[in-house]
Image (tube, grey):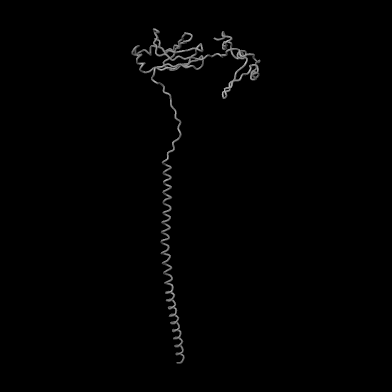
């Protein structure tokens, strides 16, 4: 009997101790839960409240900052595309083939070679056809009549209907020349004058000096100062393989024919 009561008392003590420990554990658990909840709630609320505006503000700022940059880049690119680069071009003008004017012009290339060009206007061509028949140009040949107005002689040069300019030689220089454009009938040789050129004075082709001087004159184009040097003392003569001449006439005779020289002391040498 006494043993049972001792067991019962021990079991009661252990049960009471378990309950006490359980109650203490539950009390401490409740206290810990109560202590954690107020700490946890502000910690959870603060980051959520602070993170949202920060994220939105940064996103807005980034959007605001990136938008004007993007638009500025687009504007600059559009400005570049709007500018058209025009390459530098060299302007040139072609001379017309015809001026539709009836004219004959004579020029000199050298003292003994002349150049002449001509043109017949369409109105004058129609007038020639009316006066001489529709077959006028087919039944006639064009000629240039060269007139030396100084020595009073002339000569003819046969040309063709495909040409509108011509080079030719003349026997005399230092004369006045004029040129006529005519057409000759192939059967009757009757002449039809079309146009007369201007009068042209061509220069002399001779070496001219007034007298047999013993010196050459040199002019400084900057100061207009004229200086003279004796022919026999010119240094360049020693390098061209001739003896020192006494006069200019001797010097020129070494290089030119007698007919190409003209001097006041020797007028017979003028051709």
Place residue 184 in its image quadrant. Answer: top left
28 sits left or right of 206 in the view = left
Residue 223 position in % (x across, y down):
57, 24
How many numbered marks have been drawn onto this rendered protein structure? 0
The extreme left residue here reads 130
**In-front residue for pair 18/192:** 192
Identify the image quadrant of the C terminus. top right
Residue 220 position in % (x across, y down):
58, 23
147 sits left or right of 228 in the view = left
The extreme bottom residue here reads 1
Residue 167 position in % (x across, y down):
48, 16
**In-front residue for pair 208/24:** 208
Residue 61 position in % (x across, y down):
42, 56
Place residue 255 in its image quadrant. Answer: top right
The extreme top residue here reads 188
Identify the image quadrant of the N terminus. bottom left
């Amino acid at each position: 009997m006494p043993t049972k009561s001792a067991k019962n008392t021990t079991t009661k003590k252990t049960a009471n101790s378990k309950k006490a420990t359980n109650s203490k554990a539950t009390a401490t658990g409740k206290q810990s839960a109560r202590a954690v909840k107020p700490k946890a709630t502000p910690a959870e609320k603060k980051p959520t409240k602070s993170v949202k505006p920060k994220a939105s503000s940064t996103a807005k700022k980034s959007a605001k900052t990136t938008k004007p940059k993007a638009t500025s880049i687009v504007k600059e690119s559009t400005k570049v595309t709007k500018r058209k680069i025009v390459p530098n071009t060299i302007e040139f003008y072609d001379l017309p083939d015809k001026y539709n004017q009836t004219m004959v012009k004579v020029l000199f290339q050298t003292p003994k070679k002349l150049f002449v060009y001509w043109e017949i206007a369409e109105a004058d061509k129609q007038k020639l056809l009316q006066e001489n028949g529709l077959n006028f140009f087919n039944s006639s040949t064009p000629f240039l009549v060269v007139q030396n107005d100084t020595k009073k002689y002339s000569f003819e040069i046969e040309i063709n209907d495909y040409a509108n300019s011509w080079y030719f030689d003349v026997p005399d220089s230092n004369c006045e020349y004029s040129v006529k454009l005519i057409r000759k009938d192939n059967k009757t040789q009757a002449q039809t004058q079309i146009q007369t050129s201007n009068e042209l004075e061509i220069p002399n082709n001779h070496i001219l000096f007034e007298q047999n001087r013993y010196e050459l004159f040199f002019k400084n184009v900057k100061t207009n100062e004229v200086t003279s040097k004796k022919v026999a003392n010119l240094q360049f003569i020693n390098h061209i393989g001739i003896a020192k001449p006494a006069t200019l006439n001797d010097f020129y005779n070494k290089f030119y024919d007698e007919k190409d020289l003209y001097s006041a002391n020797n007028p017979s040498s003028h051709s």
